[in-house]
């Protein structure tokens, strides 16, 4: 009885605030990722990217496209929560269930895109003679191959266990966090496994660079120092992604120990995810030099063109004045 009062009064207000803030974060992430993705496509289409940087830029495009799709789904979940809190609407439908499964798959694809980025750096730095794994076509189709492989693996357990359900108090569909087998399987496939692989790869690259530091030429040393700096930045991002999953893990273990489900478990768990979407969309711009250069060159183009027009106009005016 006490739980019911808490849900109807204080918890409902807190849940509404969480959904409202999450909506702002996800909207920001959606807009930034959409803009950056379109800029990347424009530069790739018009060959404004150096040949040696194209794979890195394509991998960034995959990440931003996934952020765009995932943050769009999170926005729809936030809107449903807000409308449900305000007007007590129900959004229970087959489409809602389907979108819940799609959200789980997209979250896994986001981490796999970071894994692809780590794999490419591993091949380029530690196994540079393996040209087959440095093919642009391979990295273009790799996310599609992973989607075909990961989706059946993830859903093969979630669907039989009825992993994704409609949450009437939250007004959206997602994997039920108190369904321990399904949520642990989803966390392992979409979250823990990719993050462990990413960490292992970057640690291996770091050790390789340190071991090779004394026997390389100055140019290679400078390139490896740049790679090491980029890796450190990406490792910070990956560490933050790992930390942001801690609140939901703590609440799940509290449920296992006490048998009492926190009424805002779903919204609290998705709130750090919304923060991570916003943070990723901005942090990557400063962590990947190739991506940063594209944005800076776009800014320079926008500022240089008007100045050149003004100079040409001034010269023309002086010419006219001189003839007069």
Image (cartoon, helix red, strand yellow):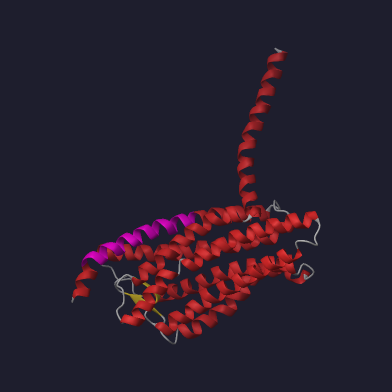
Q: What x and y, as percent, mark residue 43?
A: 66, 52
* 304 versus 189 height, above or below: above
Question: Residue shown at 76%/64% (left/top)?
Answer: 212
* 73 versus 49 height, above or below: below
Residue 176 in sight in this render: no
**Residue, far top:** 324
- Residue toward you, 243 or 174: 243
Q: What x and y, as percent, mark residue 63?
A: 57, 63
- Quarter of the image holding residue 306? top right
Residue 26 in sight in this render: yes
Q: What x and y, as percent, mark residue 321?
A: 68, 15
| Span shown in magenta | 9-31
- Residue toward you, 79 or 219: 219
Position of 54 with respect to 6 (left or right) is right
> Magenta stretch containing residue 299, yes or no?
no
Question: Residue shown at 81%/57% (left/top)?
Answer: 217
Question: Residue shown at 44%/59% (left/top)?
Answer: 26
- Residue toward you, 141 or 265: 265
Position of 201 with respect to 172 (left or right) is right
> Magenta stretch containing residue 25, yes or no?
yes
**Residue, far bottom:** 160
* 44 versus 202 height, above or below: above
**Magenta stretch secondary structure, dominant:** helix
Q: How many marks?
A: 0
Question: Residue shown at 55%/69% (left/top)?
Answer: 111
Q: What x and y, as percent, mark residue 234?
A: 59, 61
Where is the C terminus found, in terms of image quarters? top right
Position of 102 with respect to 211 (left or right) is left
Where is the N terminus found, in terms of image quarters? bottom left
* 321 versus 292 height, above or below: above
- Quarter of the image holding residue 255? bottom left
């Amino acid at each position: 009885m006490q739980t019911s009062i808490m849900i109807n009064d204080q918890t409902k207000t807190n849940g509404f605030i969480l959904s409202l803030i999450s909506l702002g974060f996800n909207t920001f992430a959606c807009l930034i990722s959409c803009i950056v993705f379109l800029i990347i496509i424009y530069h790739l289409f018009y060959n404004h990217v150096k040949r040696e940087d194209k794979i890195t830029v394509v991998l960034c495009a995959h990440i931003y496209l996934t952020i765009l799709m995932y943050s769009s789904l999170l926005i729809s979940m936030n809107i449903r929560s807000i409308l449900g809190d305000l007007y007590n609407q129900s959004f229970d439908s087959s489409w809602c269930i389907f979108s819940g499964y799609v959200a789980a798959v997209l979250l896994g694809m986001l981490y796999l895109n970071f894994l692809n980025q780590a794999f490419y750096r591993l091949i380029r730095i530690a196994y540079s003679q393996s040209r087959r794994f440095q093919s642009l076509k391979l990295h273009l189709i790799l996310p599609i191959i992973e989607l075909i492989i990961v989706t059946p693996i993830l859903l093969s357990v979630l669907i039989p266990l009825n992993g994704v359900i409609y949450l009437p108090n939250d007004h959206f569909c997602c994997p039920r966090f108190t369904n321990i087998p399904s949520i642990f399987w989803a966390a392992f496939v979409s979250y823990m496994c990719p993050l462990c692989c990413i960490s292992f790869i970057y640690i291996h690259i770091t050790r390789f660079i340190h071991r090779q530091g004394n026997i390389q030429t100055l140019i290679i040393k400078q390139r490896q120092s740049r790679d090491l700096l980029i890796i450190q930045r990406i490792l910070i991002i990956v560490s933050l992604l790992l930390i942001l999953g801690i609140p939901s893990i703590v609440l799940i273990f509290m449920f296992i120990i006490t048998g009492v489900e926190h009424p805002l478990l779903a919204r609290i768990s998705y709130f750090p995810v919304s923060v991570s979407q916003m943070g990723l969309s901005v942090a990557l711009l400063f962590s990947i030099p190739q991506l940063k250069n594209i944005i800076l060159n776009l800014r320079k183009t926008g500022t240089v063109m008007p100045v050149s027009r003004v100079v040409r106009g001034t010269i023309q005016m002086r010419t006219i004045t001189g003839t007069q």
